Image: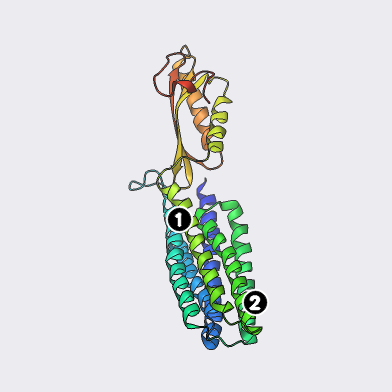
Amino acid sequence: MSEGTSTDDRRRFGRAALVNVLGNAVKIAVEGAAGVAFGSVALVADAAHSVADLVASVVVFLWGGSRYETADEDHPHGHQRIEPLTALFVGAVIVVLGLNLLRESALGLLEGAGVTFSPVLVAALGFAMLDMYVVYRYTAWVNADLGSAALSALVADCLNDIYTTVAAMVGILGVYVGYPILDPLAGALVSVLVVYQGVEIARENVDYLVGAAPPEGERRRIVAAIREHAEVEGIHDLRVFYDGTDLEVEVHVEVDGSLPFREAHDVETEVVSRLRGMEGVGDVHVHLDPSGLGEWKDAPESGDGGE
């Protein structure tokens, strides 16, 4: 990635994160005011959910863009792991708040709902849905090119916001038709969805942080790219794992042992360049071996076997 492209991507990332900050702030103000004024647990729960979203989007705005910084002496592999760490924080905040909202909803069910219906509640929820839909569409559009884990977390959060606001709307309409118990029930449903969303975001980004292996399809894609080179006769000791959201590749590639040293070096350079040019691949380490030595590690991957 060139410096100009990186700067442009970081600028677009920042704009998308800022849109999430502003969208959540406006939603909190509108829903929170209406929910407190008319005693709606569902609206207060949905607004409180957006407080977590606001915190998360602020963290992404201030911190997440660090992934676009180049490698330095303190971070020789770059800053890729900062992004999933940011997304993990988003997931943790969402889980904690969701559990708190579930507690508040349970109290509403036990103690009775004190909500008063007003068209203002419906209008506030309608505005909240439109607000989050606009933020969702914009963030997803930007992230279609960037492929950011942090923005993906915000996209999921926006979509989940729409679902939870629909649940809150059901609760308010229940109050309108004479079933006020539906308001805390809707709040409870919102809370469960919030917790589920947070757990899923956290689970995905833990894999990025601990260097987990990618899905098998990614490994096959890399093996196929290596074997496409005409001089490659075998592969062994292949390791593919996450380094942040990028894939890191370590592999021993077998070539004809009689190749002149310079030609063998060219093969290595071409394989490394080919892999680094693949989508989602970051650092690549290739070690060349003469074919037919029968090295002890991962022997089935050599020659025509294994991969």
Q: How far across and down, in percent of the image, does residue 117 sit?
A: 61, 87
- Left or right, 69 with respect to 229, comes to left
| 200 up-or-down from 223: above or below | below
Q: Tell me the residue at 61%/77% (across/down).
A: 125
Q: Quadrant of residue 297?
A: top left
| SS assignment at label 2 | helix
Q: Tell me the residue at 52%/64% (across/down).
A: 17
Mark 2 closeness class: few <14, some 14–19, many ≥20 residues within 10 Å: some
**Residue type indicated by callout 1:** Ala
| 26 up-or-down from 2: above or below | below
Q: How far across and down, in percent of the image, does residue 83 sit?
A: 45, 54
Q: How far across and down, in percent of the image, does residue 56 sit?
A: 46, 65
| 108 up-or-down from 100: above or below | below
User: What residue is shown with label 2?
Assistant: 126
Q: Residue furthest left?
A: 74
The one of 260 and 216 positioned closer to us in this rendering: 216
Query: Is label 1 in contact with label 2 (beta carbons under 8 Å)?
Result: no
Residue 113's mark?
Answer: none
The one of 120 and 103 positioned closer to us in this rendering: 103
Q: CA distance from mark 1 to mark 2?
A: 30 Å
Q: Quadrant of residue 126?
A: bottom right
Q: Earlier in the sequence, mark 1 or mark 2?
A: 2
| SS assignment at label 1 | helix
Q: How far across and down, in percent of the image, does residue 219 sit?
A: 52, 34
Residue 277 seen in render: no
Q: Tell me the residue at 49%/75% (across/down).
A: 105
User: What residue is shown with label 1?
Assistant: 202
**Residue type indicated by callout 2:** Gly
- Left or right, 206 with respect to 33, comes to left
The one of 168 and 76 positioned closer to us in this rendering: 168
Q: Quadrant of residue 157?
A: bottom right
The one of 303 and 59 positioned closer to us in this rendering: 303
